[in-house]
Image (cartoon, helix red, strand yellow):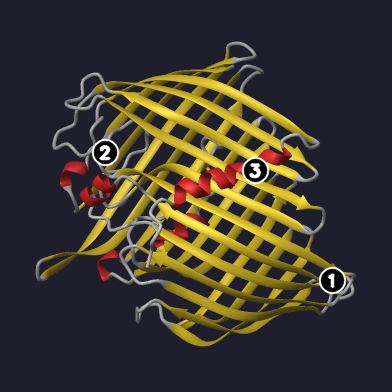
């Protein structure tokens, strides 16, 4: 079981310290401090309240971004402490919400020893069945600060043209110190720390038609409220190129999962088989079918380049993990509206296991001064706790236009629809939940260091759960961002 409640205090300085000894090495460093002040009016500031309440929200967000790009050091660091002031609020009138992103990779010994590290601190909705918003300015007890840390030292060794070997150790830690909000949302999400190691051996340039990979791994996740989760296994993966267009794929191995849970326990051989089809430089399709957990599954990755600046992708994946693991694996995504790195996350946070089966399709492109994106997702949740089972469909679009050298505009929208079974005592009933949001913003660059933005967002919700949440919300904002 979990023993070190203060491990984050050790991991974050360790992660930050990875790059410090090499700060003077040859690399292009870019440090950009900035300050953004935003004034927002909304007619629904307290999402949890029984009646809609209007308020003016003042947001002050100092920020610093640091990037380094060198032969032996890469750093991407961003930190913003967001201060919110609510003049008409009862009780506490202000909040500070921290957002931090760090990724660094350091070559400590040339062509031999490396250290990769990531850290993320951001705000997450605890349960999307409760109060949610399309604006970060609104207040709710359903939002909490989630922290994820990972550090991975690894060794690489090249065996000529025959193979490349890699031995990696990793430590992952997930936590939230907002226990009061977690309890209010009915979430039993708690701290978890994983210790693991992986060995892999990849075929070298000596193999042209037949490429192979051998791997072995061990991982132990220590959880506060539940039993430890131990998984280990080995796998041999191969691909054989029949011709320029078609390759056969396959793998065979062994995997063990032990968590004192019949939902996740597994001790058996795993396998899959499939193909990769590349009929031309604009199209690629990879498909695999096999047995990776309990029962058959498949995976799909397809890509088609419509024009040199437009592409469509389709994918399907099937995963079985704890929510703490998913927070680490899924936290880095690119927001299509803001272009910022944000947390992908899941529909809720708890301490159980979940199997997710996810279809994704996306279209992205540029045409002249216009860029656009359109995406859709279908995800089914099969949870260790059956009341968390859910199927959710989401769709989103974004259209941006550079009007002039100083002026740009964006319109965007999103829609989500979910179905699940709710229970009250001995009774159960089907629930549907719809949430949609649409908005637009216009940015004008006043000077080289000052940018102003005017934006409007409208959202609405309907469904059969928590009627007080089913009401429209409007947000009108004006912000000034100064690069210092």
Q: CA distance from mark 2 to mark 1?
A: 53 Å
Residue situated in front as seen by the camera: 133 or 127: 127
Q: Residues within 10 Å of mark 3 (few under 14, many from 20)?
A: some
Q: According to the image, label 1 marks what residue?
A: 204
* Residue where numbered disc 3 is placed: 365
Residue name at image x 54 percent, y 77 percent:
232
Of 394 and 172, which appears nearest the observer?
172
> In which quadrant will I find the N terminus?
bottom left
- The answer to whether residue 240 of the structure is visible from this angle is yes
Q: Which residue is mark 2?
A: 140
For the C terminus, the quadrant is top right
Q: Residue farthest to the top?
A: 447
Q: Residue 398: image x %, image y %?
A: 52, 39
Q: Where 356 sits versus 465, above or below? A: below
Q: Can residue 345 be seen in the rendering of this structure?
A: no
Give the percent coordinates (x, y) of residue 439: 42, 32
């Amino acid at each position: 079981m979990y023993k070190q409640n203060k491990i984050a205090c050790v991991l974050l300085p360790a992660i930050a310290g990875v790059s410090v000894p090499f700060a003077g090495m040859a690399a292009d460093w870019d440090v950009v401090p900035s300050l953004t002040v935003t004034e927002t009016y909304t007619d629904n500031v307290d999402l949890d309240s029984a009646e809609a309440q209007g308020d003016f929200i003042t947001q002050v967000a100092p920020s610093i971004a640091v990037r380094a790009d060198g032969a032996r050091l890469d750093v991407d660091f961003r930190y913003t402490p967001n201060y919110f002031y609510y003049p008409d609020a009862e009780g506490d009138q202000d909040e500070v919400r921290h957002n931090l992103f760090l990724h660094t990779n350091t070559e400590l010994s040339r062509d031999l020893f490396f250290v990769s590290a990531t850290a993320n601190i951001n705000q997450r909705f605890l349960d999307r069945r409760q109060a949610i918003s399309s604006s970060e300015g609104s207040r709710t007890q359903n939002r909490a600060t989630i922290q994820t840390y990972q550090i991975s030292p690894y060794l690489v060794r090249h065996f000529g043209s025959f193979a490349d070997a890699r031995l990696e150790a990793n430590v992952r830690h997930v936590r939230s110190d907002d226990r009061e909000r977690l309890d209010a949302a009915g979430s039993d999400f708690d701290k978890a720390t994983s210790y693991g190691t992986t060995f892999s051996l990849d075929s070298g340039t000596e193999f042209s038609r037949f490429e192979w990979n051998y791997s072995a791994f061990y991982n132990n996740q220590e959880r506060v409220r539940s039993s430890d989760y131990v998984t280990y296994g080995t796998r041999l993966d191969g691909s054989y190129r029949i011709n320029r267009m078609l390759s056969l794929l396959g793998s065979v191995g062994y995997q063990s999962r032990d968590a004192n849970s019949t939902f996740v326990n597994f001790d058996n051989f795993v396998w899959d088989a499939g193909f990769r089809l590349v009929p031309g430089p604009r199209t690629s399709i990879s498909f695999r079918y096999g047995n990776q957990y309990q029962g058959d599954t498949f995976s799909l990755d397809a890509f088609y380049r419509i024009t040199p600046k437009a592409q469509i992708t389709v994918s399907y994946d099937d995963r079985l993990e704890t929510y703490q693991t998913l927070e680490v694996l899924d936290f880095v995504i690119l927001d299509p509206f803001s272009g910022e790195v944000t947390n992908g996350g899941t529909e809720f946070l708890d301490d159980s296991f979940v199997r997710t089966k996810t279809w994704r399709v996306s279209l992205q492109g540029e045409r002249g001064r216009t860029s656009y994106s359109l995406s859709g997702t279908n995800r089914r949740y099969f949870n260790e706790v059956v009341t968390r089972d859910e199927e959710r469909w989401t769709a989103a679009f974004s259209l941006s236009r550079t009007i002039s050298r100083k002026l740009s505009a964006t319109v965007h929208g999103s829609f989500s629809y979910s179905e699940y079974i709710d229970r009250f005592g001995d009774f159960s009933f089907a629930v549907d939940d719809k949430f949609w949001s649409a908005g637009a913003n216009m940015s004008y660059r006043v000077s080289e260091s000052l940018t102003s933005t005017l934006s409007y967002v409208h959202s609405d919700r309907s469904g059969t759960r928590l009627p007080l949440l089913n009401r429209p919300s409007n947000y009108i904002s004006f912000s000034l961002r100064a690069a210092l």
